[in-house]
Structures are given as C-alpha cells and as structure tokens.
Amino acid sequence: MNYQKYDLKANSDFTIFEFISTGLRGDISKVIKYTVTNNPDLVNLGFGDKININNNNGTFDIDDINITDNGDRNVILATVANATYTFTKLNPDKFVFFSGSCDIRTRLYRMAITNNYKELTETFIIFGIIQNPDTAKYYNIPFNSSTKFVGFLIKRK
C-alpha cells in the first residue's frame, strides 16, 4: 500500500510491533500484537495505545478503547497494514482475525478494506465475519463492501 507509514519496531519473533503516532495531541505510543488463539492456525490482531504497567520489566497493556484523535488515522491504518504484511509473510499459514472495539471502528476497517480491496486481494484472501441472530453462531463469508461485519479474517494466498 502506497501510503505514509510510521516506522515499526518489532520484537524478535515479529508478534509485537511498536510505533509512535505523531499528531495533534503529541507523540503517542502504539502497539500491534498478534496473539495465537485456542486454534493454533488463528491469530488475533490486537492494536491500541501502549500502557506501561511496569517499566522495570517492560510489561505493558494495550488500550483498544481510547479514541486518541491524533489526526493521523490513515497513517496509523497503513502502519497496522504494514505490520500485518510483515507478520503474514513470516507466518503465511496463519489466519489473522481483527475487529474494532466498537461498531464504528469495525465499519472504519471495512471502509479501509473496501478502499484498498484490489491491492489487498493480490496478497490476501479476505473474509468478513457475521453472526447468525437466530443461533448466535459466527460464520465467515467472502468479503463484500455492503455487509455489516462483526470482524474480519485474512490469510496470505
């Protein structure tokens, strides 16, 4: 994707990426974390503001609820996409799941996928996750821009 991106700093196994969002509210530390789920083929993409819990040992948490409003949304989305390209290049067998912490953020992700669909599908298979209201079960279907999804699932081709 040919967008401005922040420089990423990754841990040794490329499951945690950090960067600094620079904008209207100053410099804000951000973290992208890929966590294996109960299904070893499925990884959850977590993202948000970095909250240091213990600076002595580097322990941190991720605040995925806070609305930073730093004026750099598109740069941030491109940076997260860049980390995902890197992670999936090293882990092509993994499915990556992500969703927003609220409906508005999930809709933002759907719009970002829609706007970059052609380029993204050169590298990824993209699914949307829907919930059956009668059974409360979740299903993945091929991505389309008009469906309201609760999350997304991608995998390298």
Image (cartoon, grey):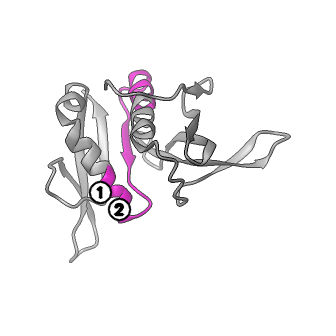
Please report the residue visible at 50 percent of the width from the left and 53 percent of the height from the top: 69
Q: Residue 15: name its quadrant.
A: top right
Q: Amino acid at mark 2?
A: Ile
Q: Secondary structure at mark 1?
A: helix
Cβ–Cβ under 8 Å for marks 2 and 1: yes
Q: Mark on residue 107?
A: 1
Q: Does the magenta-highlighted stretch encompass residue 96?
A: yes
| Real-space CA distance between mark 2 and mark 1, rounded to the nearest whole angstrom | 5 Å
x and y percentages locating residue 59 in the rendered image: 74, 44
Please report the residue visible at 51 percent of the width from the left and 46 percent of the height from the top: 47
Q: Which residues are magenta?
A: 83-108
x and y percentages locating residue 76 in the rendered image: 45, 39
x and y percentages locating residue 113 in the rendered image: 25, 42
Q: Circle 1: is it few (<14), some (14-19), or many (20+) Cα within 10 Å?
A: some
Answer with left or right where residue 3 lies relative to residue 13.
left
Please report the residue visible at 28 percent of the width from the left and 72 percent of the height from the top: 136
Answer with left or right where residue 94 lies relative to residue 69.
left
Which image quadrant: the C terminus? top left
Furthest residue in direction right, as rendered:
56
Q: Amino acid at mark 1?
A: Arg
Which image quadrant: the N terminus? top left
Front residue of 54 and 43:
54
Q: Residue 73: name its quadrant.
A: top left
Q: Which residue is mark 2?
A: 104
Front residue of 23 and 40:
23
Please report the residue visible at 55 percent of the width from the left and 59 percent of the height from the top: 66
